[in-house]
Structure formats: C-alpha cells, structure tokens
C-alpha cells in the first residue's frame, strides 16, 4: 500500500498513520507534539496536511492507499505559520536568551515554515518558574502543552509526575507533588521525561551553553534535514 | 415542588469518612472520580484539600490530576463557595432580558463581587454559560435549583432569604417554577406516549424490523451532526464485541437550546424507552444518561421514572418477560463544560477525566466508553426513535421534505411574544416561524446556536431543513433594537470560555478572536485587525481538532460577510 506525499511515493503498512509512513520513508512533516516512541497526541496541529483535499493531522490520521497528500505547499505552510505564531504569542519565548536556542523544535519549525516576525499581540502571561529541583528547571511560559513529558513520565517512567490542569487558555502544566514543585516530586534527571521537551520549558541545570549557539542541532542542519530526524522506534504504540 | 435543602457547612472532621463512604459506594473505581467530585462539591460547596488527598490515596490518582479535573469544570471549586451558590445564566438571551443589572443588584444587596465568596462564607454570586432556560430568562441556579423569570422584586426577596439563612427548600415554590411552554404540537407531541409500545413492537417485528422503520423515517441525529440513526445503531450491533453501551447525550450546552430539558421533564418515558430500544437492538446491557449538572434538579424525577419502569418490567432483567432482554440505565452528572457535549469528550468525562475530545478515528461506535462500541445519541433522537418504532417510518415521513423527513422540536427564545417549544415539520421558512411565535421588527435570527447560522432580515425566506439551513435545537430572535456586534461578541467570548484548550488553533485562536471582536465592538479595530480575524478564522476552521474550534469563528465571519456596513460604520466613528 502507498500514497503520494508532495509527488513522492510513500509506502506504508496496515495501521500506519501518515506521519509514521513519512518518517519511515525519511520524509519530513513538521511536528511538535509527536514522537514516534509515544501514542499520537494531536494537539499542536503543525503536522497539518491535506489528504485528498481534506485537512487532517498527519500524526493521528491513518494512511489511505492511493491517497494524495500535500504537506510542503504554500497553502499548508501558511496555516502552519499561523499556528507557530500563535504558540509564540501565547507564551514568552525570548530565543536569544534561551538555553534551548538552536536545538528547539518550535524555533526550527518556525524557520521551516518561514515565520520571521511576530504576528499576534503577545499574551504576556506573568512569569512562572520552578527551580526547586536540583538538576532541572521548568519555565512554564515556554511550555507549548505538547504533553510529551506527561506521556514519557506516565508511560515510560511509570511516575505520572506531570499533568495538565484547567481549561481553555487557562490550561497549564502541573507537577504531581505535595507542594506542586518539581523538587518534591519523584522526578529524576535520568527519567525519559527529562530529555523529551521539544522546547526550552524543561531544561537541565548546570549545563548552561555547553554547545555554543551557532553549532547546535538545527544550526547545523535544518529540521527537515536527515541528520535532525529522530530514530524511528515504535515502542510506545499500543499494538506493541 | 423541589425538595431543595441547604448544604451543611464544611466540617473537617466529616470529610474523610464522607469521602470514604463515597469511594466505597463507587467500588473504588477511578472512572467514578468525576461523580465523586460532584457529590463532594454538592456537600461542601467546594472540594476541600483533605478530600482531594484522600481520593488520591484511595483511587491511586495523583492529587495534581484531581485538581486538574476540578479546574476544568465550571461547577467544581477548590475554594469554599458558601451556603448559597448563585449561578446566573449568562447567555445572550439572559443578557437581553436584563440579567446584568440583576446580577449587580444582587451583588450590591449582599455586598459581594461576582465570583468571589463572601467573607462570612454565606454566599457566592457568579455566572455560568446558558443553563437551558432561555424561554423563561433571566434565570439562575441556587444550589443547583433553577430560578426562572427573575426581576428586581425577586432579587430583593432572594437577598433577604439569603441574609436570613432560609434553607432553599423553604423559599417560595413559585420561584422555582419551570414552565413547559409547549406552543405547537405536531406528530410527536400530539398525544401521550404509550409506555412499552415501542418495546412490544420490537419483540413483534425483531431488530431488523425496527431498523427498517428507522431508516424509512429518515431519522437523523438531533444533536447537531445529523448522522443517520438507523445506520449508527446497526453499525454498533454488527461489530464483534463482548460489551456495548448506549449513551444518551443530555449535555445540552448549545446556548438557547432547551428542548432536551423539556423532553426529560415532560416526555421522560418516551426518551427512556428510546434508549432501552437502542440497547436491545444493539445488544448493549447498559445505558448511561449524561445529564448536564445544570439539570441536576431533574435527576430525582428521572430516577423515579427508571424505578417505575423496572417495576413494570420495562427496564432491568427480562424486559417484558423476554429471556435475555436485559438492559438497565444509570444517570451520571456532568460538571459544567460545553465541550462535554461533543461525544468523545463526553465519554472521557464519563470515564472520570477532563473532557478533552479524542482523536478520531476510532469513532465511539467502534471504540467508545471503556473502549467498547457505544452509541451516543441526543435526547431528542431517542425520543423520536421510540415514536417511530411504535407508529412506523411512513407515519413520520408524512411530514417534512425529501432530505429532512418528519418534524423537529425547536427551542425558540429572544424577541418574540411566545418563547417556548415548537414542533414544526422540516422545511418551514424562518418568516413563518417568526409569525407563529409572534416576533416583529426582527433584525436577525441565530439558528442552531453560536456555532450555527446567522440569518439577517433579508433572508427570512430560507428554510429550516438539511437542504438549506440545518436546524439544531436553538432558535434565537433579535429585534431591530439589538446591538448585533454585541451579540457576536457574546458568542466569541462563549467559545473562548468553553474551548477545552487542547489544540493550538482553538485554545489560542478563540482568545485572539474574542479580544479582536471586543476591539471591533468598541469601534477601535483597524483594517489590519479585521484582516487578522479572517486569517485566524481560516486557521481555526482548517486545523482545529474538533467541531468547537472548527465553528467558533462563525459568528464574527458571518457578520463580516453579511453585514459589512456594521464594520465600516464602526471604523468611521471609532
Ligand atoms: C462542541 C460540540 C458540542 C456538542 N454538544 C452537544 C450536546 O450538547 N448535545 C448533543 O446531543 N450533541 C452535541 N454535540 C454533538 C455530539 O458530538 C454528537 O454528534 C451527538 O451527540 C450524536 O447524537 P445524534 O446522532 O443523536 O445527534 C456536540 C458537538 C460538538 C462538536
Ligand atoms: S514542558 Fe515541554 S514536554 Fe512538557 S508539555 Fe511543556 S513543552 Fe511539552
Ligand atoms: S478544537 Fe477546541 S475544543 Fe476541540 S480539541 Fe481543540 S481546543 Fe479542544
Ligand atoms: S505533531 Fe501532529 S498534532 Fe502535533
């Protein structure tokens, strides 16, 4: 079985999503909340593609034999550009001052879709930082609610350290501990959840700028380049 | 008429035993969490910290997740609300009927600010989205019991009753009068339903016979999406599974809609028989009514109906003495979230979680409640199904149009003389409906709530049917004195308030739109901002994960397209 993605033939097997098939075929579809190791989530929406003329999220949509999928087109990228701009507007992202700069997926996807200037009035939420943990720090204003740390801690570390609270624009990441602080939780720097954050919300302490800016992951290779791609593992899938 | 009792003050000593007894009665099932939280909230007017920690321990759920659920639902609170919780309905219709002034009057009399508990723990006055009383607005809830047709006199009396700590069950009964307001009857409301008639037909003709009647009747879901009911039931029946569920969607969150409230109150037997019919046809043993917490006052009435039907062998084991015809129904409460009307969010909520819609596929008919095939239908869908099973598909098809067969219940409110429930055949023009309900000087009609369609006075010959204007529950009328942009703003604020917050375009987009529409309304929007609204709308329509985000920009976009003069005028004067 196969489908056409931007003119390229992409084979897939039963049960694959469009994203699974594309990643297996070494073809990049932008994504922020997806990681092949985890159950698909579908929250960021930047993996939007047009499948037979219908907009769907590639990370959750089962691939269909013979379908025609458009991803890297101006029509699709222009929507992604707005989505990324919305994420920037909602949080506080001062890229030049961020330890993650250069290896941040939000920043890299912004480059990929050609988002160069802010587009919306910023929400400017009040600063919220948790530095209580000896090894890690959380800046909640950089969190894009992708829930990768939630899934990693729950499904791989077996700890349920993170969850989401609230509704709508009040939705926010929260920590499971008596004080609500990371330092009082079961979280450990060796957890899978510790190195899953696609942005600079969940960062290691004591490692400030080990790799100079300019030589980081997406500084060297754009996010759609082969070297920047995650290895394809599927251990998080329920059918495994 | 209602046996309302005042709630006891929060008492530390009793919290743990109370929580323990609840947990025990729920068999320690984590999926009952939301129901337990609603019970605790009802008991104490909030969910105390001790209760959260105890639940966390007993159900093995992190306390942060329990708090996360409380913060998701409008009727659950982490802070004590007091002996009297007043929730004013805040729909556009309530506002048009003067609710804002009444809220202010009550707050002034009681010396409170909206949403903030009074220091002495006596009372909290707050607002919630539409409580389903638009035909008797302005309305509010006191400790869960609806107060209708509020006016200054009543507000004054309420303030006195609160100050004198009079228990709610001693308040004047007429404060709590909920009228049926049936204004027009057709096929379905003409005569009372004969209990058990649909079920007897089922045992006579078999499941295929009933499914055939249902497809002939052309019945399509009354909850919004308009999916063919016979096809849904058949799909669920034909899937190989060890368990199945039937879920009645009684979340009725669409502002201006009250047909489900009317049916549950007045035609409960018809609805319950429809649910039972679906259970027996699909092979489910269990039905669940997801009742929005705003309708909690109907729970006892429904429980009594269920009990009566069990006595008459119309529910439970061996229905109508048929071997293996086992089906029972349970009522579960929501906790205040419009998104829980979306079927997959509803199922998440039934499983005790935050009401976040699921990725689809799979759809509920293949993998729904507890991962089992589940039919989710609107209250009115079950109601019609029971009648069609009894009277036949051709009977129903004697009315309506080719694509929109039969009749439909409309909840009509706003600027007209006779707001209430109207049963009309499909295909009527808007102007005919306006005539029947005594509307004049009509400027606009909002059909099917904020996510539906705005119809201006130049398009009143449009027809209410799937071929033209798909009609949901709500039909709100605005006369020429109304501020149309103000109405659009109310709708935009509603979506921002009710977005579940899961996906980027809806979480951020509804907030952005609500801010921009506020600027438009105050006359300060620039052309660039108007353009931005269009871009955000396009992004939300194409990339949102569920129907809420995909329709949330409709009010402002339809106003821009249909009434551009509203915007140029604003621009000039601003
Ligand atoms: C945001 C949103 C809110 C909804 N609210 C309701 C509701 O309150 N009641 C309802 O029956 N359906 C509601 N629906 C539709 C349900 O998802 C579902 O389609 C319906 O319950 C199916 O029943 P039906 O086929 O009988 O219409 C809503 C859908 C969306 C997207
Ligand atoms: S902290 Fe990082 S990984 Fe966790 S939800 Fe936020 S952005 Fe995602
Ligand atoms: S569209 Fe809105 S309501 Fe639906 S999943 Fe996204 S955020 Fe939630
Ligand atoms: S990667 Fe698909 S929605 Fe985020």
Image (cartoon, coloured by chain):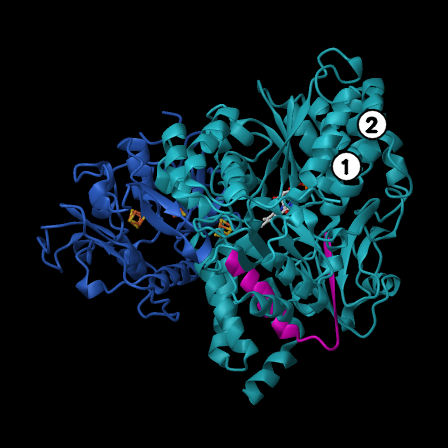
Chain colours: A blue, B cyan
Residue A28 visible in image:
no
Of B301 and A149, the residue lying toward us: B301
Tag 2 secondary structure: helix
Q: How many marks?
A: 2
B218 to the left or right of B75:
right
Q: Which residue is labeled 2 in the image? A: B198
Labels 1 and 2 positioned on one and the same chain: yes
Residue B77's x, y, as percent?
A: 47, 49
What's the mark number on residue B223? none
Q: Which residue is labeled 1 in the image? A: B268
Of A17 and B176, the residue lying toward us: B176
Of all chains, the one bearing label 2 is: B
Residue at x 59%, y 56% (from the top left corner): B86
Residue B35's x, y, as percent?
A: 53, 36
Of badges 1 and 2, the one in the foreground is 1
B81 to the left or right of A23:
right
Q: Quadrant of the N terminus of chain B?
A: top right
Residue B495's x, y, as percent?
A: 55, 59
Tag 1 secondary structure: helix
The residue positioned farthest toward the bottom in the image shown:
B573
For ligand 1, the image quadrant comes to top right
Q: CA distance from mark 1 to mark 2?
A: 14 Å
Mark 1 and mark 2 lie on one chain; the one further toward the N terminus is 2
Say above or below: B198 vs B562: above
**Disc 2: CA contacts within 10 A as few (<14), some (14-19) or many (>=20):** many
Of A227 and A92, the residue lying toward us: A92
Is B493 one of the magenta-colored residues? yes
The residue positioned farthest toward the front in the image shown:
B164
Q: Are marks 1 and 2 in contact (CB under 8 Å)?
A: no
Q: Quadrant of the C terminus of chain B?
A: bottom right
**Disc 1: CA contacts within 10 A as few (<14), some (14-19) or many (>=20):** many
> Magenta residues, as a range?
B473-497
């Amino acid at each position: 079985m196969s489908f056409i993605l931007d003119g390229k033939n992409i084979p897939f097997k039963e049960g694959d999503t469009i994203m699974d098939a594309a990643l297996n075929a070494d073809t990049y579809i932008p994504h922020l909340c997806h990681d092949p190791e985890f159950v698909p989530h579908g929250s960021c929406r930047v993996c939007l593609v047009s499948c037979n003329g219908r907009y769907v999220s590639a990370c959750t949509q089962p691939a269909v034999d013979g379908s025609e999928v458009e991803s890297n087109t101006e029509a699709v990228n222009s929507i992604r550009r707005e989505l990324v701009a919305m994420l920037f507007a909602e949080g506080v992202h001062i890229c030049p001052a961020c330890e993650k700069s250069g290896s941040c997926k939000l920043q890299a996807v912004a480059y990929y879709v050609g988002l160069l200037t802010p587009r919306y009035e910023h929400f400017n939420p009040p600063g919220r930082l948790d530095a209580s943990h000896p090894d890690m720090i959380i800046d909640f204003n950089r969190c894009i609610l992708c829930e990768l740390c939630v899934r990693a801690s729950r499904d791989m570390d077996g700890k349920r350290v993170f969850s989401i609270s609230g509704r709508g624009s009040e939705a926010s990441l929260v920590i499971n501990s008596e004080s609500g602080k990371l330092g009082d939780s079961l979280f450990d720097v060796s957890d899978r959840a510790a190195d899953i954050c696609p942005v600079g919300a969940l960062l290691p302490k004591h490692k400030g700028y080990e790799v100079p800016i300019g030589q980081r992951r997406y500084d060297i290779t754009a996010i759609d380049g082969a070297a920047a791609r995650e290895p394809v593992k599927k251990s998080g899938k329920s059918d495994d | 008429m209602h046996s309302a009792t005042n709630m006891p003050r929060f008492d530390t000593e009793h919290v743990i035993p109370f929580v323990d007894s609840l947990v025990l009665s729920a068999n320690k099932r984590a999926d009952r969490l939301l129901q337990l939280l609603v019970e605790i909230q009802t008991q104490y007017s909030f969910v105390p910290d001790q209760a959260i920690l105890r639940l966390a321990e007993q159900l093995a759920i992190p306390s942060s997740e329990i708090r996360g659920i409380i913060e998701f639902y409008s009727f659950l609170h982490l802070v004590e609300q007091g002996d009297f919780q007043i929730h004013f309905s805040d729909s556009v219709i309530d506002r048009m009927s003067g609710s804002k002034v009444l809220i202010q009057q009550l707050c002034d009399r009681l010396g409170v600010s909206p949403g903030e508990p009074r220091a002495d723990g006596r009372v909290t006055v707050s607002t919630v989205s539409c409580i389903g009383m638009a035909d008797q607005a302005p309305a509010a809830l006191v400790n869960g019991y609806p107060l209708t047709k509020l006016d200054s006199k009543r507000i004054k009396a309420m303030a006195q009753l609160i100050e004198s700590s009079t228990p709610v069950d001693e308040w004047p009964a007429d404060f709590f009068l909920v009228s049926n307001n049936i204004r027009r009857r057709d096929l379905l409301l003409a005569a009372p339903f004969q209990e058990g008639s649909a079920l007897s037909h089922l045992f006579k003709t078999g499941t295929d016979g009933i499914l055939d009647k249902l497809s002939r009747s052309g019945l399509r879901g009354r909850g919004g999406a308009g999916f063919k009911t016979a096809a849904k039931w058949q799909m669920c029946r034909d899937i190989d599974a060890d368990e199945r569920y039937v879920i009645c969607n009684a979340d009725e969150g669409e502002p201006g809609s009250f047909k489900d409230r009317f049916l549950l109150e007045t035609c409960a037997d018809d609805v319950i028989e429809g649910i039972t019919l679906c259970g027996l046809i699909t092979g489910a043993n269990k039905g669940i009514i997801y009742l929005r917490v705003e309708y909690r006052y109907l729970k006892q009435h429904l429980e009594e109906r269920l009990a009566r039907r069990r006595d008459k062998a119309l529910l439970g084991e061996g229905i109508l003495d048929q071997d293996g015809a086992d089906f029972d129904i349970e009522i579960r409460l929501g906790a205040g979230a419009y998104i829980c009307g979306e079927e997959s969010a509803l199922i998440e909520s039934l499983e005790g979680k935050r009401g976040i819609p699921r990725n689809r596929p799979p759809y509920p008919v293949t993998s729904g409640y507890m991962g089992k095939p589940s039919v989710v239908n609107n209250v009115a869908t079950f109601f019609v199904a029971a009648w069609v099973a009894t009277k036949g598909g051709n009977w129903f098809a004697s009315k309506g149009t080719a694509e929109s067969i039969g009749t439909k219940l409309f909840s009509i409110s706003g600027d007209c003389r006779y707001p209430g429930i109207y049963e009309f055949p499909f295909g009527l023009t808007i102007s005919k409906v306006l005539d029947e309900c005594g509307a004049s000087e009509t400027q606009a009609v909002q059909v099917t709530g904020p996510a539906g369609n705005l119809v201006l006075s130049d398009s009143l010959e449009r027809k209410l049917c799937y071929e033209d204007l798909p009609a949901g529950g709500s039909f709100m009328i605005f006369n020429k004195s109304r501020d149309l942009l103000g109405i659009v703003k109310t709708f935009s604020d509603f979506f921002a308030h009710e977005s579940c917050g899961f996906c980027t375009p809806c979480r951020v987009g509804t907030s952005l739109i609500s801010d921009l529409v506020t600027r438009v309304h105050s006359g300060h929007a620039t052309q660039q901002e108007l353009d931005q609204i269009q871009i955000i709308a396009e992004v939300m329509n194409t990339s949102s994960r569920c129907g809420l985000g995909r329709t949330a920009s409709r009010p402002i976009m339809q106003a821009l397209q249909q009434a551009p003069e509203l915007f140029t005028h604003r621009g000039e004067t601003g």
